[in-house]
Image (spheres, coloured by chain):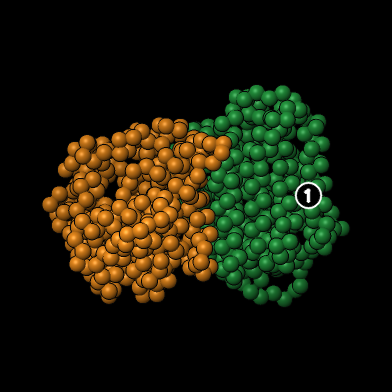
Chain colours: A green, B orange
Amino acid sequence: METQEALVYIAGTSCTPQPTSHSLTAESDENEFMAYMVRKSKSVNKALDEAVPLGEPVLKIREAMRYTLLSDGKRVRPMLCLAACELVGGHESTAMPSACAVEMIHASSIILDDLPCMDDDSFRRGRPTNHKVFGEDMAVLASIALLSLAVKQTSSSTNVPPERLLRAVQVMAQAVGTEGLVGGQAEDLAGEGMSFEENDEAGLEHLEFIHIHKTAALLEAAVVVGAIMGGGSDEEIERLRKYARCIGLMFQVVDDVLDVTKSSEELGKTAGKDVMAGKLTYPKVMGVEKSREYAERLNREAREHLRGFDSDKAAPLLFLADYIVKRQN
Amino acid sequence: METQEALVYIAGTSCTPQPTSHSLTAESDENEFMAYMVRKSKSVNKALDEAVPLGEPVLKIREAMRYTLLSDGKRVRPMLCLAACELVGGHESTAMPSACAVEMIHASSIILDDLPCMDDDSFRRGRPTNHKVFGEDMAVLASIALLSLAVKQTSSSTNVPPERLLRAVQVMAQAVGTEGLVGGQAEDLAGEGMSFEENDEAGLEHLEFIHIHKTAALLEAAVVVGAIMGGGSDEEIERLRKYARCIGLMFQVVDDVLDVTKSSEELGKTAGKDVMAGKLTYPKVMGVEKSREYAERLNREAREHLRGFDSDKAAPLLFLADYIVKRQN
């Protein structure tokens, strides 16, 4: 967000017209997209910071929530939520509480994934994981608190008809439960140690199930909730859901490829960990080259689903898809 | 629910007219109340069973969810929810999804409380705890899945205006997060090993904070959500909230007293555990006798808050308060 615009957002006045967040067009270049990313992530970080104030006296539970929620991150999920809202004609501020809620759900799942009883990770992005700093008990509580806050934030968004808020809450609850994150993680745990050959059909099916639930469901929820908040039609929401499903899977394919092709330092986390843990990954099932091709195909498919929208207005979501497929860590 | 209706609800047919659930009046005796409890808990158990079907193929995550959710229990929270709904003029079926949701939140919190990183309990009501049967990883996932399902159930209740559903979702999210269960548990963990004298003011304050959040918040949410679903006025909801706050605290006082006065066998869980863990309890802060008197005072206060309602219609909530204060395990 440009400073003038940020001031409007904060103070309610402005004199000089400035490029808006919509200034990204189909003709924009990568630099303009990066500037857009910086603006958006600043707005998101500010809103996240305000959503979980430390309070007085400082409570350990709030410190634990903030530790993971406000840690470095690209804020891809909130950005998808805001971009979908704006694409269907809504204002950024309308979707901001739910964009933050999606990031809270993401942070909550990260805390749980890292627990000793799950992936048992001590570091993430070069920092000790939540339970290493606050203890397992507090980490679990922080995770639950973030989930509750996500529901509270979304259901309390102002200036949005209650029907939309309810629908958004339902989509989020579904993305977390057995049809989402939990279902994917449970299947992942159940499948550890299973052996599949390259190009194994059963392996691919199992893998897609896990990732559609574990990764894609929340990315999909981010986009769908943004579109709901922005007042999108059922048909628009459906098209955006399909776009989101593609980039959700793509996100995981790229993640798996990076795990086998990058060093730990480049990744900011332990490289090759999935392979060592005997986990199913796309490179394991279809090889690195075909995984890359698959990611490219998903990107093309995602773009197809955005065809019905004005190409300038769809620019942020098109750029975000490219960004996900090209990312290096 | 009329018995005719109740029997239809349970078995599908009925011939003989029976006393109805509304037949509980201010003049009813304890036997009639026990019959009421049996009828209500049957309806609740049936609804809980349907809310988490095992599915085909049977998924371990669903087994884990059902293991705790459908275990023996008095269903006090759902009953409070249904009774509050009926008191303000609503029908039992209107509040049934949210009554189940409250029980799901309760089950979720039990699973987490028993984890090795929390209270580290291996048995509850004579059965191995969830993580002992399904593993810690699956137990954590089941807990999250139950929370999500609670939100989904409540937000999807049919025949209720969206404004009410949203308000109910907000109340539940608040009862779970830092202002509820999580906040109480975090304070409890922070206070372990703190030493307080009998009649210690600071100790009592700390204790009330924990229990208002850890126990009373969900009992309060059960009642308030029931009243919201039933279409209660703000004034009715507020009176019921005060009633619920009293019985919430009372519930914990009675629990603490039982922990020091009953054997493990009578309780179905390890007796004296709170004392051994150095946890603050009411008997520890004010002694057993004064704790009992305090529970009685809270019961009288709870009854006061129901004065504005028709005494026959309020009978279930009055009986439930008595039941809580007199319970033996």
Residue at x 66% of width, y 26% of height: A275
Closest to the observer: A28 or B73? B73
Task: State the image quarter where residue B15 is shown.
Answer: bottom left
A144 to the left or right of A205: left
Query: Can residue A178 be seen here?
Result: yes
Q: How many marks?
A: 1
Q: Residue furthest front?
A: B15
Kind of residue at badge 1? Ala
The C terminus of chain B, quarter of image: top left
Question: Is residue A46 in view from this perspective?
Answer: no
What is the x, y in percent for residue A67? 52, 47
Residue A82's place in the image compared with A207, above or below, is below
Placement of A60 over or under B317, stated as above or below: above
Query: Residue B101 location in percent, x, y?
Result: 44, 54
Circle 1 packing at 10 Å, graded few (<14), some (14-19), many (20+), is: many
Using the rendered view, name the quadrant where residue B7 is placed: bottom left
Q: Position of residue A31 (x, y in %)?
A: 81, 53
Q: Residue sitting at 31 percent across and 49 percent down?
A: B74
Instruction: Determine which residue is flagged by label 1.
Output: A302
Judged from this view, the residue extending furthest toward the right is: A27
Q: Nearer the viewer, residue A249 or B25?
A: B25
Residue B238 is situated, as x and y percent measured from the top left of the image, at 35, 70
Q: Chain of mark 1?
A: A
Q: Is residue A319 left or right of residue B70?
A: right
Which secondary structure lies at badge 1?
helix
Which quarter of the figure is the N terminus of chain B placed in? Answer: bottom left
Q: Nearer the viewer, residue A102 or A122?
A: A102
Of residues A307 and B193, the one nearer the viewer is A307
Instruction: Say which residue appears at 82% left-offset and 46% top-offset.
Output: A300
- Left or right: B52 with respect to B192? right
Look at 79% across and 35% down and name the residue there: A292
The extreme left residue here reads B289
